[in-house]
Amino acid sequence: MQREIQLTNDGSHTIAIPEMGVTYHSHHGAIGESRHVYIDAGLQPLLDHDNKQPIHILEIGFGTGLNALLTYQKAIAHKQVIHYTAIEPFPLTAKEIQSINYGNLLSLQKEFLALHNTAWEEQVSMHDFFSLTKRKVLLPHAQTIPNIHCIYFDAFSPTVQPKLWTQAIFENLFSMLLPGGVLVTYCSKSIIRKAMMAAGFTVTKIPGPWGKREMVRAWRDH
């Protein structure tokens, strides 16, 4: 499967898979989309509570590492301990990692490379306020990870990966969240919202990032 690095409209890179007709991020802006969907809608409300207990985040689709890097940046800025777990069955190559420009754009190149170079299948402390655990596994086969505060659901679209957007998948993710925990994703299709609600989530549509009218924030009430 061939992957190509492409420039998006905010000057940040994404990766395209031509044979699948997909990109890892919006062509309107990779950094802009990630900040809007995952940081502003998912992480920031937790930070706003000013509760200094550790925050546990689960990302479905580590991909380029952009969401993790932006979360790392927030953890340091807010002096908030964040334990970050990411599931990614198809990691980038060393050449791809070296070519992506997020680290330079955010003045975090050393940290960006470190995110990708940490060992898999173990928790690695990258900073007093940030630890990372990467798991190289397909989501349906991932072990349950309990006590999660926020899930970044960043899988490819339901058209491309329909098996990752089912009620059964969302039931599993629902069981991992603490009461009050939230799942955020860029996809707001009706069939996906219905699958989430059938799994127990309370689902709301909120304004999407540039170029997308809506996204979803879903949470566990109890």
Image (cartoon, rainbow, N blue to C red):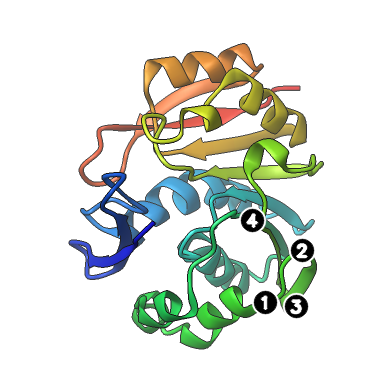
- Residue 168 occupies quadrant: top right
Asked whether disc 3 touches disc 4, contact meaning CB atoms under 8 Å apart, the reply is: no
Q: Is disc 1 surrounded by few (<14), some (14 to 19) or many (20+) residues within 10 Å? A: some
Which of the labelled discs sits on residue 121, or is there none? Answer: 2
Mark 4 vs 2: CB contact within 8 A: no
| Residue position marked by numbered label 3 in the rendering | 128
Three-letter amino acid code at disc 1?
Thr
Distance from Cα at disc 1 to Cα at disc 3: 16 Å
| Foreground disc of the pair 3, 2 | 2
N-term mark: 1 or 3: 1
* Residue at horizontal 40 percent and vertical 25 percent from the top: 205
Task: Please tell me which residue is depicted at 25% across the width and 38% down the height of the picture.
Answer: 212
2 vs 87, nearest the viewer: 2
Q: Residue at x 26, y 52 (%)?
A: 18
Q: Which mark is residue 46?
A: none
Query: Closer to us: mark 3 or mark 4?
Result: 4
What's the mark number on residue 86? 4
Q: How many marks?
A: 4
**Residue at the disc numbered 1:** 118
Q: Position of residue 187 (x, y in %)?
A: 39, 32
Is tag 1's residue or tag 4's residue first in the polypeptide sequence?
4
Q: How far is the residue under mark 2 from the one under mark 1?
A: 10 Å
Distance from the alpha carbon under mark 3 to that under mark 2:
20 Å
Disc 3 or 4, which lies upstream in sequence? 4
Q: Helix or strand or loop: what does disc 2 sit on?
A: loop
Q: Is residue 96 above or below residue 33?
A: below
Q: Position of residue 155 (x, y in %)?
A: 48, 43
Q: CA distance from mark 4 to mark 2?
A: 10 Å
- Let me know if residue 30 appears in the view: yes
Mark 2, Cα crowd under 10 Å, few <14 / some 14-19 / many 20+, is some
Where disc 3 sits, the SS reads: loop
Distance between mark 1 and mark 4 Cα atoms: 12 Å
